[in-house]
Image: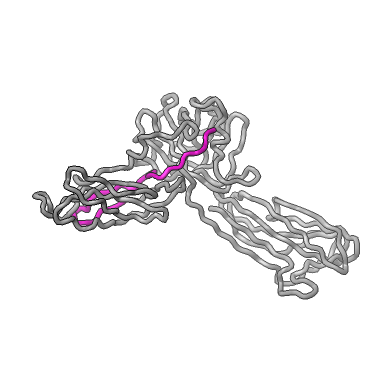
Amino acid sequence: MADRLTYTRPVVGGDVAAQGTPDMTLAVGAGYVLIANASVAVAAGNVTVTAADATQDRLDAVVVDASGTKSVLAGPVNDGINVQPPDATGYALLATVYVLNQAHADYTGTITNAMLTDMRQAAFVEQPQQAQTFSYTYSTATTSTDPGTATFNFNSTTASAITTMYISYTSATSPISALPWLKQGTSISGVRLSPYLLRLRSRKDPNNWIMLEVLGGSITDHTTFGDMPAKFVAKSNSGSTIPLSTDTYDTIFEFCGVAPVTYLFDTANLTGDVTMTNANQFYDGPSLASIGTSTSTIWLDAYITVLAGANLDKITAKLWNGTATVAEGGAVGSNVTAVTIHLSGIRQPGGAETWKISAASTGAGGTVKAAASANSAGNFASRISYMRIN
């Protein structure tokens, strides 16, 4: 496919309006913009227009920068015939505002809606290349079966209840599988770590759209279609319905940049030695409780240090939650020099879970060590860490 285009533009929300009692400020609605393909959240709030020039008009721009900060860029003053907007390179342009000079007969010292031009839809006049979009037919079915060629559906017809999209890999507008396109985002071993924004709009009426955040979980592949975790972000209509028609190939899929990502992390050390009384029984090292959610991806990293009860005892370690194991490893032990086993793995939990690293030995009398036997800096010999994304 062609290289991805770089976009800086509004995506959803971000409407600009005069105040109920007009003054020199404007109200900006909450929404999202793209800055160089990165999704940026915009908080609702006011922006202030610079005072009008004494004798010349101005065309200002209401913009958002890469940090989500709203502002008004003042345009160059002009005679009112050749008024030009300011250079808004690097900003997402929401609206322009015509500022009359103070000598003008209609000057009131306030900004009204008549002076505003909404630039959000203008950002979508030039649609992305085909590599960026696919056409599909929307079905109101809510089943998890193959939706059919070039068709998709959700697990619910209520927008806010959407958690999964069932989508055919065959699109009406591309001869190749849509799967690689759908799996955009940073990934490790096929697990998508960076959620992205997916805009679904009507071909016949582009004002009808729904925005989804495709979550960190990888698509469950069923050869011809996939189950794709998704979360509702915003839509063009009020109420609970999904504003898409079921007309053939009427829905356009648009990649709208990486979604805002939240990172959480923590670590835990073993605070004291653990005696491995019995052979072939797992003894717990350090653990972390209540990590993860049903929509998060977790990177786990842990190591455990074991002093064997006898030379040549075989040591096995596993990284697990008491039921599911994401990694395991082994080493030949010694009762003179402890061995350290390092494990890591990725987990997409169904909810909050407790994760730990544990060890077992083929011989009795071993010890899970909290600190190194010599020259220790503290209890750092056995440790578990995690990073959670969203």
Q: Nearer the viewer, residue 80 or 167?
A: 80
In the rendered structure, does residue 26 fall within the stretch colored magenta? yes
Q: Residue furthest right?
A: 311
Q: Is residue 21 visible?
A: no
Residue appearing at x 43%, y 35% in the figure: 128
Residue appearing at x 45%, y 32% in the figure: 129
Q: Position of residue 147 (x, y in %)?
A: 53, 28
Q: Which residues are magenta?
A: 1-28
Q: Can you say whether 57 is above or below 172 in the image?
A: below
Residue appearing at x 91%, y 64% in the figure: 311
| In-image side of 220 versus 262 (left or right) | right
Q: How many marks?
A: 0
Q: Residue furthest left?
A: 105
Q: Position of residue 24 (x, y in %)?
A: 21, 56
Q: Nearer the viewer, residue 8 or 327?
A: 8
Q: Is residue 359 visible?
A: yes
| In-image side of 117 versus 362 (left or right) | left
Residue appearing at x 45%, y 44% in the figure: 232
Q: Residue 353, located in which quarter of the rendered image?
A: bottom right
Quadrant housing the N terminus: top right
In the rendered structure, does residue 317 fall within the stretch colored magenta? no
| In-image side of 347 versus 360 (left or right) | left
Q: Position of residue 305 (x, y in %)?
A: 77, 64
Q: Position of residue 265 (x, y in %)?
A: 58, 60
Q: How is the image coloured?
A: one colour
Q: Nearer the viewer, residue 201 or 35?
A: 35
Q: Residue 45, located in which quarter of the rendered image?
A: bottom left
Q: Nearer the viewer, residue 18 or 152?
A: 18
Q: Can you say whether 249 is above or below 287 in the image?
A: above
